[in-house]
Amino acid sequence: GFQTCVQIIMGGTQTLRVQDTQCGFKLLTTVTGTLLYPQLNLKRWTHDVELLYRAQLLGIPVAEVDIQWVDKDGSKLVDGPMDAVVMSGSMLGEILKMRVWYAIGRWKVLRENEVFLEPTAY
């Protein structure tokens, strides 16, 4: 499904170091959040993939931890199966664009010293 396509585009499960990029939440230290979020290029539903990719490029440790999650009424991304196909296609297009633009250098990852942070443990 969608996660398999993400893993293929991103180069396998070892690249992002998680099985599911979209579910759950991302818990970050303040330093890590300050380092990763300001330069994100993807602002919508796929920002999670870019966040994990940038962490990998910077050597920031990532761990996937199971949590108990409760869906809330009205919190769905789409209403029906056709909407899911369209949204998934749009999201995969954004991820593919991200991968290409990082590869050709159009998007770059700034290091800690380039965003004026003191070197610190993540």
Image (tube, grey):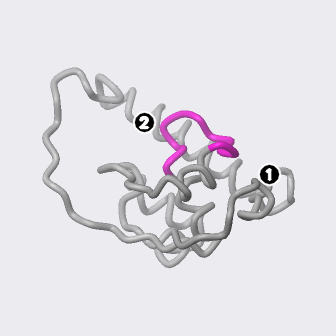
* Residue 107, disc: 1
Residue 120 found in image quarter = bottom right
Q: In the shown orientation, is residue 10 left or right of residue 6?
A: right
| Residue at the far right in the pictured view | 105
| Residue at the far front in the pictured view | 118
| Stretch of the chain drawn in magenta | 38-48
Q: Is 42 included in the stretch rendered in magenta?
A: yes
Foreground residue among 38 and 4: 38
Identify the residue at image location x=31%, y=31%.
Answer: 81
Q: Secondary structure at mark 2?
A: helix
Q: In the shown orientation, is residue 72 left or right of residue 52?
A: left
Q: Position of residue 90 (x, y in %)?
A: 56, 36
Foreground residue among 22 and 118: 118
Q: Secondary structure at mark 1?
A: loop
Q: Is residue 116 above or below residue 14?
A: above
Identify the residue at image location x=65%, y=45%.
Answer: 40
In the rendered structure, which amino acid carries the disc numbered 1?
Answer: Trp
Image marks 2 and 1: residues in contact by CB distance under 8 Å:
no
In the rendered structure, which amino acid carries the disc numbered 2?
Answer: Val
Q: Position of residue 122 (x, y in %)?
A: 51, 69
Q: Which quarter of the figure is the N terminus placed in?
A: bottom left
Q: In the shown orientation, is residue 10 left or right of residue 73?
A: right
Q: Position of residue 50 (x, y in %)?
A: 59, 53
Identify the residue at image location x=37%, y=67%.
Answer: 19
Mark 1 surroundings: few (<14), some (14-19) or many (≥20) residues within 10 A: some
Q: Position of residue 6 (x, y in %)?
A: 51, 58
For marks 2 and 1, the one nearer the N-term is: 2
Q: Is residue 122 above or below residue 86?
A: below
Residue 27 found in image quarter = bottom left
* Residue 85, disc: 2
